Image (spheres, grey):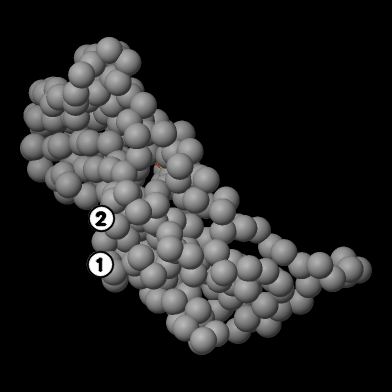
Amino acid sequence: MRVHVRIKRFNPEGEAKPYWADYDVEADPLDRVLDTLHHIKWHVDGTLALRRSCAHGICGSDTMLINGRNRLACKVLIKDLGRRITVEPMRGLPVIKDLVVDMEPFFAQYRAVLPYLVNHDPPPQRERPQSPEERARYDDTTKCILCAACSTSCPIYWGAGGYVGPAAIVNAHRFIFDSRDQAGEERLDILAERSGVFRCRTIFNCTDACPRGIEVTRAIQEVKRALLGRL
Ligand code: FES
C-alpha cells in the first residue's frame, strides 16, 4: 500500500525552527512504523535521525508521537494507522535532531528516586526470601522499560515546574513496596517535594501511553496514599 508519512524534523544546529517533511512510500500493511522509517532513512533521505535498538518492544528507545499518541515505533503496525501517518519527537524533552530527544533530564529524574534496592543488613548466606504476596505487591511496576512514553505524554511534565514525572514515580514504587528494601521513607521524602508526586493531576495520559500496560496512574496514587498515611 502507498502511505503518506509526515515527519516533524528539526536540526537545532543550523535550523531556526521545526518543519514538516512529507514522504510518499510503499509499505506492507504488516510493516511496523519503524520499518517504514527505516525505509525512508535508508532509501529516500539518509539525513533523517531516529533512535532505536532492539526493534522488538524491549529496549524502549524508539518512543515517538505517532498520529498524536506516544508509541513505540517498533510496536505499531501500518495497517492500524491507515494511509496518513504523522510522526513527531516526544514532547517535554529537548530535540537533538528530528526524532531523537535528549533523554538526560529524564534519566536524572529517574536517578533522583534511588531506583535500586537499599538494604543495610549483613548479606545473607543465600537469597533474601520473599513471599509470593510480597512479590506481587510491586509486580506491575517491575515491567517499566524506561521508554519515557508516560512522562512525555503528561501535560504537567511538559510544564516548567520540574515535575519528576510518572516514570520516576513508577520506579520509586517498585522499591517502596519491596519488602526487602529499607529506603522507602527516603524515597517518599523525595517524592513529597514540590517536584514530586502531588504535581500529578490524575490525567491518565501516562497509563494510556505505557507500552507495557503498567497501571501508571494507580502506582502514582499508591505512592500518594503512602505519603498521606504518614501524616
Ligand atoms: S526499538 Fe527497542 S523498544 Fe522499539
Along the line of sight, which residue is nearer the eye, 59 or 3?
59
Read off the residue under disc 2. Answer: 155
Instruction: Work out which quarter of the rendered image holds the N terminus and state it.
Output: top left
Q: Amino acid at mark 2?
A: Pro
Q: Amino acid at mark 1?
A: Ile
Picture coordinates of residue 70 (x, y %)?
27, 48
As displayed, is residue 153 above or below residue 41? below
Q: Is residue 16 left or right of residue 35?
A: left
Picture coordinates of residue 83 (x, y %)?
8, 37
Q: Secondary structure at mark 1?
A: loop
As displayed, is residue 123 above or below residue 110? below
Along the line of sight, which residue is nearer the eye, 165 or 138?
165
- Regarding residue 173, the answer to whether it shows in the image is yes
As displayed, is residue 113 above or below residue 20? below
Q: Is mark 2 within 8 Å of ligand 1?
A: no
Read off the residue under disc 1. Answer: 203
